[in-house]
Image (spheres, rainbow, N blue to C red):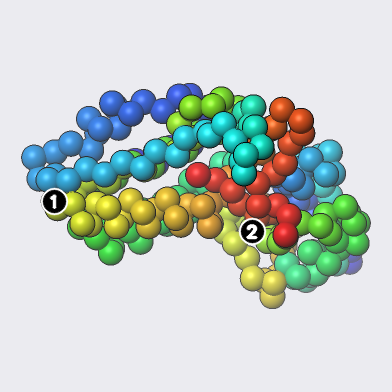
Amino acid sequence: MNSSISVLLFGITRDLTGQSAVSVPLAEGASVGDLLTQIHQKYPALAGIRSLLIAVNGEYAESEQVLTRHDEVALIPPVSGG
Amino acid sequence: MIALTSDPIDVPAALRFLQSEQAGAIDFFLGVVRDNTQERPVDRLEYEAYDRMAISEMQKIADVAQQQWPILRYTIIHRKGTLQIGDIAVLIGVATPHRAAAFEACRYIIDTIKQTVPIWKKEVFTDGESWVNAHP
Protein backbone atom coordinates (compact mmCIF):
# COMPACT_ATOMS: atom_id res chain seq x y z
CA MET A 1 0.00 0.00 0.00
CA ASN A 2 1.37 3.38 -0.96
CA SER A 3 1.10 6.46 1.21
CA SER A 4 2.88 9.73 1.55
CA ILE A 5 4.96 11.37 4.21
CA SER A 6 5.23 15.03 5.16
CA VAL A 7 8.76 16.42 5.19
CA LEU A 8 9.69 19.66 6.97
CA LEU A 9 11.96 22.02 5.04
CA PHE A 10 14.37 24.65 6.31
CA GLY A 11 16.85 27.18 4.99
CA ILE A 12 17.84 26.80 1.37
CA THR A 13 15.48 23.86 0.77
CA ARG A 14 12.52 25.97 1.93
CA ASP A 15 13.65 28.85 -0.29
CA LEU A 16 14.13 26.65 -3.37
CA THR A 17 10.78 24.86 -3.07
CA GLY A 18 8.87 27.86 -1.73
CA GLN A 19 7.31 25.60 0.93
CA SER A 20 8.02 24.88 4.59
CA ALA A 21 6.75 21.30 4.25
CA VAL A 22 6.17 18.99 1.31
CA SER A 23 4.29 15.74 0.92
CA VAL A 24 6.37 12.97 -0.67
CA PRO A 25 4.84 9.70 -1.90
CA LEU A 26 6.44 6.75 -0.21
CA ALA A 27 5.79 3.01 -0.21
CA GLU A 28 5.12 1.22 3.07
CA GLY A 29 8.41 0.09 4.61
CA ALA A 30 10.47 2.68 2.72
CA SER A 31 13.75 3.83 4.22
CA VAL A 32 15.36 7.21 4.73
CA GLY A 33 17.49 6.50 1.64
CA ASP A 34 14.35 5.83 -0.42
CA LEU A 35 12.88 9.12 0.77
CA LEU A 36 15.99 11.04 -0.27
CA THR A 37 15.83 9.44 -3.72
CA GLN A 38 12.17 10.48 -4.02
CA ILE A 39 12.92 14.02 -2.89
CA HIS A 40 15.73 14.38 -5.42
CA GLN A 41 13.44 13.14 -8.21
CA LYS A 42 10.56 15.41 -7.25
CA TYR A 43 12.67 18.52 -6.58
CA PRO A 44 15.62 18.59 -9.01
CA ALA A 45 16.37 22.15 -7.86
CA LEU A 46 17.80 20.68 -4.63
CA ALA A 47 20.57 18.88 -6.55
CA GLY A 48 23.07 21.74 -6.14
CA ILE A 49 23.06 21.59 -2.35
CA ARG A 50 26.28 20.29 -0.80
CA SER A 51 24.59 17.65 1.36
CA LEU A 52 21.10 16.70 2.49
CA LEU A 53 20.45 14.71 5.64
CA ILE A 54 17.20 13.43 7.07
CA ALA A 55 16.12 13.79 10.67
CA VAL A 56 13.43 11.48 12.06
CA ASN A 57 11.66 12.59 15.23
CA GLY A 58 14.38 15.15 15.90
CA GLU A 59 17.37 12.81 15.45
CA TYR A 60 19.75 12.44 12.51
CA ALA A 61 18.82 9.21 10.72
CA GLU A 62 20.90 6.65 8.82
CA SER A 63 19.79 5.83 5.28
CA GLU A 64 18.72 2.28 6.27
CA GLN A 65 16.20 3.50 8.86
CA VAL A 66 12.62 2.54 7.96
CA LEU A 67 10.01 5.31 8.08
CA THR A 68 6.46 5.17 9.37
CA ARG A 69 3.68 7.63 8.65
CA HIS A 70 3.71 8.87 12.26
CA ASP A 71 7.36 9.98 12.11
CA GLU A 72 8.21 13.67 12.11
CA VAL A 73 10.59 13.88 9.17
CA ALA A 74 12.79 16.86 8.30
CA LEU A 75 15.22 17.54 5.51
CA ILE A 76 18.45 18.99 6.89
CA PRO A 77 20.63 21.02 4.48
CA PRO A 78 24.19 21.92 5.59
CA VAL A 79 23.93 23.66 8.95
CA SER A 80 25.43 27.10 9.53
CA GLY A 81 24.73 28.13 13.09
CA GLY A 82 27.11 30.10 15.26
CA MET B 1 21.02 26.38 30.46
CA ILE B 2 20.21 26.11 26.76
CA ALA B 3 18.02 28.52 24.81
CA LEU B 4 17.01 29.45 21.30
CA THR B 5 15.61 32.96 21.30
CA SER B 6 14.33 35.78 19.14
CA ASP B 7 15.32 38.31 21.81
CA PRO B 8 18.72 39.99 22.23
CA ILE B 9 21.16 37.97 24.36
CA ASP B 10 21.61 39.35 27.88
CA VAL B 11 25.33 38.93 28.59
CA PRO B 12 25.29 40.28 32.18
CA ALA B 13 22.47 37.85 33.03
CA ALA B 14 24.52 34.98 31.59
CA LEU B 15 27.50 36.02 33.72
CA ARG B 16 25.37 36.16 36.86
CA PHE B 17 24.04 32.68 36.07
CA LEU B 18 27.56 31.26 35.72
CA GLN B 19 29.07 32.79 38.85
CA SER B 20 29.46 30.60 41.91
CA GLU B 21 31.86 30.27 44.82
CA GLN B 22 33.48 27.21 43.22
CA ALA B 23 34.01 28.83 39.81
CA GLY B 24 37.58 30.05 39.45
CA ALA B 25 37.21 30.52 35.70
CA ILE B 26 34.39 31.68 33.46
CA ASP B 27 34.87 31.65 29.71
CA PHE B 28 32.59 33.26 27.17
CA PHE B 29 32.46 32.88 23.43
CA LEU B 30 30.30 35.42 21.62
CA GLY B 31 29.58 34.98 17.93
CA VAL B 32 28.87 38.43 16.51
CA VAL B 33 27.45 39.56 13.17
CA ARG B 34 30.29 40.91 11.00
CA ASP B 35 29.86 43.53 8.29
CA ASN B 36 31.45 41.49 5.50
CA THR B 37 32.11 38.00 4.17
CA GLN B 38 35.33 37.80 2.19
CA GLU B 39 35.12 41.55 1.70
CA ARG B 40 31.56 41.42 0.33
CA PRO B 41 29.50 43.88 2.41
CA VAL B 42 26.86 42.19 4.59
CA ASP B 43 23.65 44.05 5.40
CA ARG B 44 22.17 41.55 7.89
CA LEU B 45 21.88 37.85 8.73
CA GLU B 46 18.68 35.84 8.86
CA TYR B 47 18.76 32.79 11.14
CA GLU B 48 16.28 29.98 11.25
CA ALA B 49 16.21 26.78 13.27
CA TYR B 50 14.50 23.44 13.55
CA ASP B 51 13.71 24.36 17.12
CA ARG B 52 13.12 21.04 18.86
CA MET B 53 16.12 19.39 17.24
CA ALA B 54 18.37 22.43 17.68
CA ILE B 55 17.66 22.33 21.40
CA SER B 56 18.22 18.57 21.68
CA GLU B 57 21.44 18.69 19.64
CA MET B 58 22.77 21.55 21.80
CA GLN B 59 21.86 19.49 24.88
CA LYS B 60 23.86 16.53 23.51
CA ILE B 61 26.89 18.77 23.03
CA ALA B 62 26.57 20.11 26.56
CA ASP B 63 26.22 16.58 27.94
CA VAL B 64 29.42 15.45 26.19
CA ALA B 65 31.25 18.55 27.43
CA GLN B 66 30.12 17.87 30.98
CA GLN B 67 31.51 14.33 30.78
CA GLN B 68 34.80 15.61 29.45
CA TRP B 69 35.47 18.64 31.68
CA PRO B 70 34.60 19.57 35.28
CA ILE B 71 31.90 22.07 34.31
CA LEU B 72 30.13 23.76 37.22
CA ARG B 73 27.62 25.62 35.06
CA TYR B 74 27.19 26.36 31.38
CA THR B 75 24.95 28.44 29.20
CA ILE B 76 24.32 28.15 25.47
CA ILE B 77 22.06 30.77 23.89
CA HIS B 78 21.50 31.00 20.14
CA ARG B 79 19.51 33.68 18.35
CA LYS B 80 17.08 33.20 15.52
CA GLY B 81 15.40 35.71 13.26
CA THR B 82 16.97 38.79 11.68
CA LEU B 83 20.24 40.07 13.15
CA GLN B 84 22.01 43.31 12.37
CA ILE B 85 25.75 44.07 12.25
CA GLY B 86 27.17 43.88 15.77
CA ASP B 87 24.38 41.74 17.21
CA ILE B 88 25.38 38.71 19.27
CA ALA B 89 24.24 35.60 17.39
CA VAL B 90 25.42 33.02 19.89
CA LEU B 91 26.74 33.00 23.43
CA ILE B 92 28.59 30.09 25.03
CA GLY B 93 29.53 30.45 28.69
CA VAL B 94 31.34 27.86 30.78
CA ALA B 95 32.27 27.99 34.46
CA THR B 96 34.93 25.62 35.83
CA PRO B 97 37.28 25.60 38.83
CA HIS B 98 40.34 26.39 36.66
CA ARG B 99 40.83 28.16 33.33
CA ALA B 100 42.18 25.40 31.04
CA ALA B 101 38.95 23.41 31.17
CA ALA B 102 36.81 26.52 30.63
CA PHE B 103 38.75 27.47 27.47
CA GLU B 104 38.67 23.93 26.09
CA ALA B 105 35.00 23.27 26.83
CA CYS B 106 33.93 26.61 25.39
CA ARG B 107 35.79 25.93 22.17
CA TYR B 108 34.46 22.38 21.93
CA ILE B 109 30.89 23.60 22.33
CA ILE B 110 30.99 26.33 19.67
CA ASP B 111 32.97 24.18 17.19
CA THR B 112 30.48 21.32 17.54
CA ILE B 113 27.43 23.59 17.34
CA LYS B 114 28.67 24.75 13.95
CA GLN B 115 28.86 21.12 12.76
CA THR B 116 25.70 19.46 14.06
CA VAL B 117 22.98 21.83 15.29
CA PRO B 118 20.15 22.45 12.76
CA ILE B 119 20.37 26.22 12.60
CA TRP B 120 20.84 28.02 9.29
CA LYS B 121 21.95 31.51 8.43
CA LYS B 122 21.37 33.45 5.29
CA GLU B 123 23.76 36.28 4.54
CA VAL B 124 21.91 39.21 3.04
CA PHE B 125 24.37 41.33 1.09
CA THR B 126 23.74 44.76 -0.27
CA ASP B 127 23.53 43.08 -3.72
CA GLY B 128 22.10 39.58 -3.12
CA GLU B 129 21.82 36.81 -0.57
CA SER B 130 23.11 33.30 0.13
CA TRP B 131 22.58 30.46 2.61
CA VAL B 132 25.93 29.87 4.30
CA ASN B 133 27.61 26.47 3.58
CA ALA B 134 24.76 25.34 1.32
CA HIS B 135 26.79 25.00 -1.87
CA PRO B 136 30.02 23.11 -2.60
SS at circle 2: strand
Q: Residue at x 90, y 57 (%)?
A: A44
Residue B54 in picture, x, y percent from top left: 53, 47
Q: Quadrant of residue B70?
A: bottom left
Q: Which residue is mark 2?
A: A56
Residue B73 in picture, x, y percent from top left: 24, 45
Compared across the picture, whether A50 is left or right of B121 comes to right
Residue B48 visible in rendering: no
Q: Amino acid at mark 2?
A: Val
Mark 2 — on which chain does it sit? A
Q: Residue at x 64, y 71 (%)?
A: A62
Q: Residue at x 28, y 64 (%)?
A: B68
Compared across the picture, whether B74 is left or right of A42 comes to left
SS at circle 1: loop
Q: Quadrant of residue B105?
A: bottom left
Which quarter of the rendered picture does the C terminus of chain B lie within? Answer: bottom right
Figure disc tally: 2
Q: Which residue is mark 1?
A: B97
Residue A9 in picture, x, y percent from top left: 73, 46
- Residue at the extreme left of the image, as rendered: B21
